[in-house]
Image: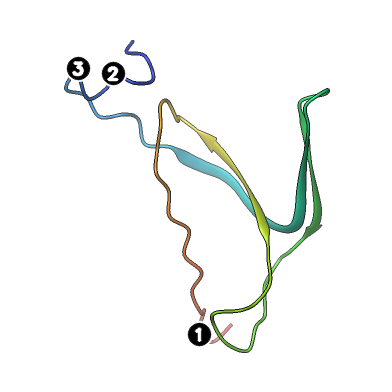
Amino acid sequence: MPSDTDFSAAGEEPPIPEIQALLLCDREVYDPRTGTRSLFGIFTRVDVESFPAGFELDFYARLTNANGLYTFRLEFVHAVGT
């Protein structure tokens, strides 16, 4: 199996990651002593009057099948009718 950095050198594509969880929250804290993460103020929805909105959010993503370096883009869209 190739290492994290030599998929392209071997002419292979890295595996496509699958999202197991994506959570938006007020704050995420990592404890290096225990290796655990704590999420505070988890949102089920975000209501704003217009975009861009002026507040900060943290997000936590749990992925599987990721091996190597990836670039991700997160888009927030207006869900009409919800």
Characterize the local packing of mark 2: few (<14), some (14-19) or many (20 or more) Cα atoms within 10 angstroms. Answer: some
Task: Name the residue tied to disc 3.
Answer: 10
Q: Quadrant of residue 9?
A: top left
Q: Regarding mark 1 in the picture, which secondary structure is present there?
A: loop
Rendered location of residue 34, percent (x, y) = 82, 23
Query: Residue 18: x and y, percent?
Result: 46, 40
Label 2 element class:
loop
Asked if labels 3 and 1 touch by Cβ distance under 8 angstroms, the answer is no
- Alpha-carbon neighbours of circle 1 within 10 Å: few (<14), some, or many (≥20)? few
Q: Residues within 10 Å of mark 3 (few under 14, many from 20)?
A: few
Residue that numbered label 2 is attached to: 6
Q: To which quarter of the image does residue 53 belong?
A: bottom right
Residue at position x 22%, y 25% from top?
8
In the visual, does 40 lie left or right of 73? right
Q: Residue 21 placed where, x, y %?
A: 61, 46
Q: Secondary structure at mark 3?
A: loop
Residue underneath mark 1? 80
Residue, x 40% and y 26% (percent of image)?
68
Quarter-wise, where is residue 37 in the image? top right
Q: Which-is-in-front pick, marks 2 and 1?
A: 2
Q: CA distance from mark 2 to mark 1?
A: 43 Å
Whether label 2 touches label 3, CB < 8 Å: yes
Task: Name the mark nearer the viewer: 1 or 3.
Answer: 3
Q: Amino acid at mark 2?
A: Asp
The first of marks 2 and 1 along the sequence is 2
Quarter occupied by the C terminus? bottom right
Q: Is residue 61 left or right of residue 18?
A: right
Q: Amino acid at mark 1?
A: Val
